[in-house]
Image (cartoon, grey):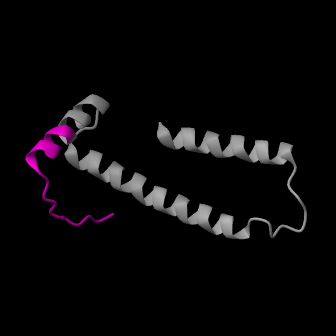
């Protein structure tokens, strides 16, 4: 995989916070931290888009969802979010 170099300008105070976070969480360097943060943001945008699409379908199902089904789906969603939070 090839990579491209980009330039990002950050205020010194914010960069200090980034450096503290890099050390605290255990990333090798700023670059790895920033890559991870960007990946997380891209996934967040995708998730929001999927939720929006699902919300448009709300109420259009040919059958009603039971409380048990909603609870099962809710549990699956929270498990997925917990995996992503690690």
Residue 58 sits in quarter:
bottom right
The residue sitting at 78% across, 47% down in the picture is 70
List x then y, in percent, for residue 80: 60, 44
Magenta-colored stretch includes residue 3: yes
Nearer-the-camera pick, 23 or 4: 23
Would residue 31 be found to the left or right of residue 73 on screen?
Answer: left
Nearer-the-camera pick, 15 or 1: 15
Nearer-the-camera pick, 43 or 53: 53
Q: Residue furthest left?
A: 12
Q: Residue furthest front?
A: 59
Would residue 22 be found to the left or right of residue 70 on screen?
Answer: left
The residue sitting at 28% across, 65% down in the picture is 2
Q: Which residues are magenta?
A: 1-17
List x then y, in percent, for residue 83: 55, 40
Residue 17 sits in quarter:
top left
Nearer-the-camera pick, 31 or 15: 15
The residue sitting at 81% across, 70% down in the picture is 60
Instruction: Tell me the quarter of the image containing the N terminus.
Output: bottom left
């Amino acid at each position: 995989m090839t990579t491209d170099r980009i330039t990002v300008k950050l205020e010194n105070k914010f960069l200090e916070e980034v450096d503290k976070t890099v050390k605290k969480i255990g990333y090798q360097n700023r670059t790895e931290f920033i890559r991870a943060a960007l990946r997380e943001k891209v996934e967040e945008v995708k998730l929001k888009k999927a939720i929006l699409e699902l919300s448009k379908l709300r109420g259009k199902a040919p059958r009603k969802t039971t409380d048990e089904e909603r609870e099962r789906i809710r549990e699956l969603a929270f498990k997925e979010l917990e995996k992503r939070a690690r």
